[in-house]
Image: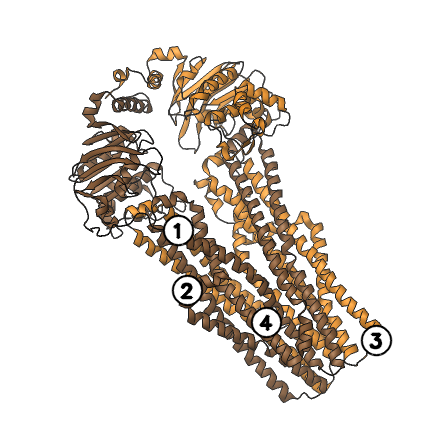
Chain colours: A brown, B orange
Amino acid sequence: MRVFKDLMWYFKLEKWNYGGGILVLALVSLLSLFPPYIVGVIVDHIDNGTLTEGILFRLMFILFILAIVVYVLRYIWRILIFGPAIRLARLLRNELFEHFSKMSQSFFQKRRTGDLMAHSTNDIRAVEQTAGVGVLTLIDSITMGGFVIITMALTISWELTLIALIPMPFMALAVNKYGTMLHKRFSKAQGAFSSLNDKVQESMSGIRVTKTFGYEEEEVASFKKESDHVVEKNVQVAKVDALFDPTISIIVGFSFFLSIVFGARYVVLDELTIGQLTSFTVYLGLLIWPMLAFGWLFNIVERGRASYDRVSNLLKVEQDIVDKKNAITVVPEGDLQFQINEFTYKEGEDATLKDIYFHLHRGETLGIAGRTGSGKTTLIKSLLRDFDIKNGNVLFAGRPLDDYTIDALRSSIGYVPQDHFLFSATIADNIAFAKPDASYSEIIEAAKLAAIHEDISRFDEGYETIVGERGVTLSGGQKQRISIARAILANPEVLILDDSLSAVDAKTEEQILQSLRRIRRGKTTLITAHRLSAIKHADLIIVLDQGEIMERGDHQALMGQKGWYKQMYEHQQLESLVERGGMSS
Amino acid sequence: MIERHKHLLIPLPQKTVFSRLLSYAKPHWKWLVIAFLLLIGGTSAQILGPIIIKVFIDDYLTPRIFDLQPLLFLGVTYIMLYILAAVMNYAQLLSFQKIALKIIQQLRIDVFSKVERLGMSFFDQFPTGGLVSRITNDTEQVKELYVSVMAVFIQNIVFLIGIFVAMFALNVQLALFCLIILPMILVIMQLYRHFSSKYYAEMSEKLSQLNARLNESIQGMTIIQVFRQERRMNRDFQKTNQEHHEAWFKSIKLDGLLLRPAVDFISIMALVLVLSFFGITSLNSPVEIGVLYAFVNYLDRFFEPVNQMMQRLSIFQQAMISAGRVFRLMDHDEIAPIKEGESEPKIGNGEIEFKDVTFSYDGKQNVLKNITFTVKEGETLALVGHTGSGKSSIINLLMRFYKIKQGDILLDGVNIKEYEDQELREKMGLVLQDPFLFVGDIKHNIRLFDKRISDNDIVEAAKFVHAHPFINRLPKGYETPVGERGSTFSSGQRQLLSFARTMAKNPKILILDEATANVDTETETEIQAALEKMRRGRTTIAIAHRLSTIKDADQILVLHQGEIVERGTHQELLQQQGLYHKMYLLQQGAEKLEEITVE
């Protein structure tokens, strides 16, 4: 029940709705007592032969009005109680999303997307259930249960009520116990299902091996075994699930039996009329639901609490990259000075970057080369303030990066990441991502500069083609070029290409580099690449090795040094020759 | 996704789906009959309860007759009936669930084995993720259809029928009156089905949009942050969230209007009907109060099943769509090529001949053009060439993963089309580039499913390919568990295990697809030694990336864009100073690179 306390802030926020809903719910419970009462009255009238048309008509009319009123009230409390519950789901989802958007990369690296998704869907759903069905069952079982018992005790017989109620607590107990068992077995069934899923995943990935050895039949047999497991676990669930109805009906049956047997005694003793006894059994019927609900309540609340804890823990994670006090909002423009003494992602690990000192004038192009894992991407990301460098500094227009607000800093940077990520929206939307109000001609211009315009024009729907699963599947090279167009359209002070030309062919690469040189005049560009042809024209090229600058200079100078750069460059020249089938172009 | 597979995404029409789903129940008819009998038994016992109380009220309580024996009899019967009902109902509920689970298992096995029999052409084109979700998630939806829709409908309908039978037994006239309830309920059901299918579809559509947006944003957060679009993305998300909320709220309103409150309304109206009937009748003639009691009691129980059925209606719609997609996949006809002709040739020498083979995956672009070569028994042929030059396609055809349309491939002079699948798989050992390991232990990964391979054979095979030493060093030796995709082993070790797997079968023809990835130096020498041993005495076709490994091949084919551009032995090709020569120099990391670099 602690979760209700945890959610109190929300109940207070929606106090009118919840308050109103609870009131209406209680009223409905109260009104539900009338029909059985009327049944009793009529039975007694018939029994005594005192029924007249007038009485009958009046009572039926009351029942009819009651039916309408209860219908309306039932509708109202649903809106009043379930409404705020799903608004809570909306609220929490928005909060989570906003929170995610404030988190730095390290947050996402530590957590799997699947888990974050589960928190935002299943857990929120469980909290919503607590705030809706949970509140309903709590209130309903208290009011309905309470009213019915009081009525039975006061208007009919408190002794008979006590006797008839004897089996009822067992029902709440049983339902609660079954609920817990069901939940446990259900998780096991889910586990079996997910291992079946893994099996299928494996079979599909390993289909080549299976086909090579001709083991299709055997694969099917082993799939069958796995699916036997699923059946078995689900039968375990069914075994508990099937207990609910029979248990309830046996307990209710006993309760009826007790009330009839003892009720009959009271009738014989003239302490009770037959009509009252009939009403009594109908009242008893009304108690089934509150007892059931009470049993369920514990399960709902238990799950709700665990889920709410997970969601609020997630929301409590603090932002690790924040604006300094007095950070200026001026968008930086100017030289870049890297003065990094040392940087490590985790304390105690080897330095990812070490002794990085260089000065890049405004308008120059920097090329960064080096093996995988040499620190190229880390160097570039230091500019984005994906993390803060404690030992050393990066100066932008003469000031350390954290002198600027993150927003101001990022306004002057355009970034094309290594793993070209596109949103499942239209191509136009993707290109105009940083500038949603861009005109179509701006978009086309950017696409032309990134040498992707022709590809896009070939699609049936052109720039309105949807990207991703539901639309067209793009090749790696096409995605890269759209990412480049996206950054070009932003026209940033500093443009960063992180190995963003790896999947385009040599000719296209040259074309893109040429247009970049043209439009980036006077603006700073940073390029990392495996293929050195992409950085050949840079004003300054640095070669990184294990986080340190191993070689530096322009292409000419580096070719003269006879080091790694020269060797690599020549190797790649030959490689492209082989790719072309030995013919030089 | 290619054109040929697009229809797989469109679900089949509901009628076809429904009858096919029903046909899946056929093999279980015996159990179904038993479950049905139990259901009828349990329901009858449940329904007899109020009748006993009626007898008690009318025959004993009202006239005040209290003989111990008949009363005891009634009481015991009543309790026995309830216990009997509970037992039968439990058995019945469980049986229906079991049958449903068995049916789903069969459906899953059917679709899985169908997919296993599809040709490689299918797997090369259709995304794996979609297939997996078809075989598991979609069938899971169908499970809901059987477990929570069909079973509940059958049980509740039988129960409702039972109630009516009892009512008719008690009072035909009143029971006839009560039949009016049915059309009222059907109208509400129909209305609810109509609107809910629309609203629920909208809601689940919005939910999947919401989840897609969330998922995408989590993955693309860097981009969002770098381009400072957090606020816009927040706004967009809030908008989708709002739309989802509205759809949800609409369905809550719908539920409020047509679900329980409406059914409760009808139940009170039914009560009015019954009471009026008895009241009016009693004005003229005496009525049995026990009958009234029983009717009121039945009405009380009548509406819960109705509520239950209505709540399941929305699941029904969803499940039918999933079932439609599953059947689509089952109907897909892209079976792997099978044996043609009556003869039963066997592979003896292992001589391979390609005669003017031209091949295309899509029927437009040829990936192999006029490929002709012969490999004699025991000889080694090496294929070299850049990515996309057609090396793998040659192997795909030789393994009969694809059907050849132009040209012929002969094994021992017999067309490859005429061989039994088993003969081909047994005599030709293909070692794949990506040594895929299955979850299980090392033994299982070497033996796979061949029961003829003894534990001893496994050790022999492992020794033969130099895998035995490293396996032996593992704490559990050959029983060491292999995790998902064998990620606990180095790529070199995985390679050796896949060699052992092939060698355990002792194939006549060996096809090697060399790994492109660099293997750790530790195992590198072992792999080379193993490869050499494996080739000995076997006809071998090898795709080589490292030219140093094929120096001693009897014949080397250099492929470029689907054509053989150079052929000969290592020495001959070097002398030609052509493409092979350049490739060789490239790999040697030659100092003389400058000399041949053009530009």
Residue with the most extreme front position:
A348
Asked whether the beta carbons under mark 3 and mark 2 sit within 8 Å of each other, the answer is: no
Q: Which mark is residue B214?
A: 1
Query: Can the viewer see residue A499 in this picture?
Result: no
- Check disc 4 and report the residue beneath it: A145
Crowding at dot 3, Cα within 10 Å, few <14 / some 14-19 / many 20+, comes out as: few
Residue receiving disc 2? A9
Judged from the image, the secondary structure of the residue bearing numbered disc 4 is: helix
Determine whether label 1 and label 2 are within 8 Å by CB: no
Q: Is residue A130 above or below residue B324?
A: below
Q: Give the residue at x 29% y 51%.
A: B229
Q: CA distance from mark 1 to mark 3?
A: 73 Å
Left or right: residue A286 compared with residue A413: right
Give the x, y percent position of residue B186: 58, 67
Q: Give the mark, 1 or 3, whose residue is nearer the N terminus.
A: 3
Is label 2 in a helix, a strand or a loop? helix
Q: Which sits earlier in the primary sequence, circle 4 or circle 2?
A: 2
Mark in front: 1 vs 4: 4
Q: Which amino acid type corresponds to the residue marked 1 in the rendered image?
A: Leu
Place of residue A264 in the rendered image (x, y in percent of width and height, measured from the top left): 74, 77
Residue B67: image tag: 3
Badge nearest the viewer, 1 or 3: 3
The lab-note entry on whether marks 1 and 4 share a chain reads: no
Q: CA distance from mark 4 to mark 2?
A: 28 Å
What subunit carries mark 3?
B
The amino acid marked with disc number 3 is: Asp
Judge if badges 4 and 3 mark residues of a common chain. Answer: no
